[in-house]
């Protein structure tokens, strides 16, 4: 009986350890940073103004908060052109296709924001790839034929020398 009660108590402690912080975060009022002696955010900035990436490449774009030492609030990221670059909720930018896009990080209340221009290089065109393959095939064919003719001539010369020596 004591073992069953002990297991139930342990399970209850585990459930409370998980749920209690969640319940408290919803019930307690939000405390501003300056009430803890920290600084309230007065602006956002990106450490770079422009980023160049390739298609399918990822780049972590994280802003800083002003004044220096202020806690970074929760941010929302947006892209001006999702066909060129998309931005994940974590701030990671993914290049999609060639062009320019502006990535914006804004506080949830919309009071502060920062922008960074992202240029994604264009993919190499495959428009002429069949032509390149054809030219490579022709060059290889001509090379093989040239060696074949040279080898054949060498063999004939060798046979003539052998017949003349007999």
Image (tube, rainbow, N blue to C red):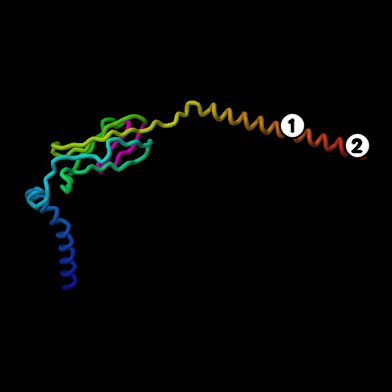
Answer with left or right where residue 135 lies relative to residue 163: left
**Helix, strand or loop at disc 1?**
helix
**Circle 1: is it few (<14), some (14-19), or many (20+) Cα within 10 Å?**
few
Q: Badge 1 is on which residue? A: 149
Answer with left or right where residue 28 lies relative to residue 87: left
Q: Is residue 25 shown in magenta?
A: no
Q: Give the extent of the magenta segment.
A: 83-97
Instruction: Point out residue 38 in the picture as x, y percentages from the top left corner.
Output: 11, 50
Instruction: Point out residue 149 in the picture as x, y percentages from the top left corner.
Output: 74, 32
Residue appearing at x 9%, y 48% in the figure: 32
Instruction: Point out residue 12 in the picture as x, y percentages from the top left corner.
Output: 15, 62
In this picture, is 8 found above or below 38?
Answer: below
Residue appearing at x 34%, y 41% in the figure: 58
How far apart are labels 2 and 1 at the CA level? 23 Å
Q: Badge 2 is on which residue? A: 164
Residue appearing at x 82%, y 34% in the figure: 156
Instruction: Point out residue 117 in the picture as x, y percentages from the top left corner.
Output: 28, 33
């Amino acid at each position: 009986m004591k073992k069953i009660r002990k297991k139930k108590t342990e399970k209850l402690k585990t459930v409370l350890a998980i749920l209690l912080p969640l319940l408290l975060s919803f019930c307690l009022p939000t405390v501003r940073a300056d009430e803890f002696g920290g600084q309230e955010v007065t602006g956002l900035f990106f450490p770079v103004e422009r980023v160049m990436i390739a298609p399918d490449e990822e780049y972590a774009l994280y802003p800083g908060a002003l004044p220096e030492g202020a806690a970074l609030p929760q941010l929302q990221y947006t892209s001006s052109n999702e066909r060129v670059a998309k931005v994940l909720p974590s701030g990671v930018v993914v290049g999609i296709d060639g062009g320019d896009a502006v990535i914006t990080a804004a506080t949830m209340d919309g009071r502060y924001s920062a922008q960074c221009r992202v240029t994604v290089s264009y993919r190499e065109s495959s428009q002429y790839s069949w032509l390149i393959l054809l030219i490579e095939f022709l060059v290889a064919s001509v090379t093989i034929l040239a060696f074949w003719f040279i080898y054949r001539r060498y063999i004939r010369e060798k046979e003539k020398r052998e017949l003349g020596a007999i």
